[in-house]
Structures are given as C-alpha cells and as structure tokens.
Image (tube, rainbow, N blue to C red):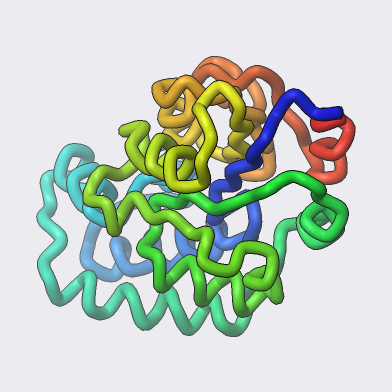
Amino acid sequence: MSRYKLVIFDCDGVLVDSETITNRIFADMLNEAGIPASMQDMQTYFVGNSLPQCGQIVFDLYGKVLDAGFIEQYKPRRDQALKSQLQAVAGVKELLAALRLPCCVASNSDGDKVREMLTLCDLIQYFDQRIFSAADLGKPKPAPDVYLYAAATMGFEPADCLVIEDTHIGVSAAVAAGITVIGYSGTMPAERLMNAGASQVISHMSEVSGLLS
C-alpha cells in the first residue's frame, strides 16, 4: 500500500513531450530577432519557466525586450508545431491507466494550453477538471503556490502527496511546498534535479509504479 494519497504531475516534459518542440520554436524566433540564443541556452536557462519569466531571462541574458508582437507570433507558431508533432511521454499512458491513486496536473502553462496538449495526446480523460495552472494563479514555479493549491483543492496535505517533475524549477517548487518530488530525467540531467531537491530520479515513467507500492 502506498504511503502517498495523491500524485501530482507536471505537464510539459512529464506527461507530454513538449519541451524540445517549444524550445526550438522559441530559439528560432529569438534568432530571427537577432538574439543569439542556442538550444543549449534553452536547456540551461529557459526550461521550466513560464513565458513571462522567459521574457525576463531574455532581457537579463541578452539585454533585449520581447515586445507584444513577439509573443503574438510565438504562440501560434508554438501551437501549430505542438499540434503536428506532440506525443505523450513514453510510458505515461500505461502509468496513468494502471494508477490507483487520485492524480492531478500542476503546470506553469496556462490551463487552456494544458488541456489542449493533454487532449492532443489522448490523456485528458485521466485528469478531467483536475488541472491547476500557475499561470492562471499568477504565481509561477519556483513559487510553491500551484502545488499547495492543487493539494488543498484535492483535499490532501502536502506531506501526503508525490510530485513528478522534469526541471529544477519544478522540483524547487515542490520542495518549497513540502511535497516529496521524483525527478524525471527526460528533460535535464539527473544531477541537476537531485541538486534541486528531488528525492530520487527516474529515467522512464514505468519506474513510478514501483515507487508507489
């Protein structure tokens, strides 16, 4: 019997394999705007952050301001790429189908985008209305608010929850919320997740079931 009562999933990079797609579009558009961002920069500085946070990072790193026109062009390009290329993370469908604990999603992305991605990957039925958005709350990770809100809304104490995250930003948010977090190394190196406070790191979603029993 599991000591956990609720499993909280991040979305991007944990449920849906979106990070590479969105990072490539973002880097391409920065390059088109004369900003010399690389995919390594995306991995090092941007992964796990909300879009407004990414705008601040661009200013901090390159001294450039992303105007409203950039964001207006980015979103449809991102969404078109996701619609044509997005897939569920390997092993996630099998994990969710076998999961016997309540679960929900807590993401930095806005709620509508999360629902769209889960629908595209045929995962939405596992979450129904149990989708919590840090963007909608106005307090993105690494603030713990979205995890605390998800746990409270679902009726559980943080100590009774388990989070699955793929970035140091998300791991830090879960740790700050007082929630045990498993890192998934599909997005960044295990060492970076452990340094952020992950209790352990997995390399495939099939490993989660064993950790819950």
From the viewer's perspective, is residue 71 above or below residue 47? below
Residue 119 horizontal/vertical position (percent): 61, 77
Residue 104 vs residue 88, the one in the foreground: 104
- Which quadrant holds the C terminus? top right
Indicate the quadrant where residue 86 lies: bottom right
Residue 41 appearing in the image = no
Q: In this view, does 100 lie above or below 165?
A: below
Q: How many labels does the image show?
A: 0
Q: Residue at x 11, y 66 (%)?
A: 67
Q: Which residue is pictured at 43% across the width and 39% down the height?
A: 152
Residue 53 or residue 110, whichever sits in front: 110
Coordinates of residue 120 in the picture (x, y in percent): 62, 79
Residue 173 appears in the rendering: yes
4 w.r.t. 69: above or below: above
Q: Quadrant of residue 66?
A: bottom left
- Residue at x-position 27% and y-position 79%: 73
- Nearer to the camera, 16 or 76: 16
Left or right, 89 with reference to 119: right
Where in the figure is residue 33, as x and y percent of width and height?
Answer: 22, 67
Q: Could you tell me which residue is drawn at 18 percent across and 45 percent down?
A: 56
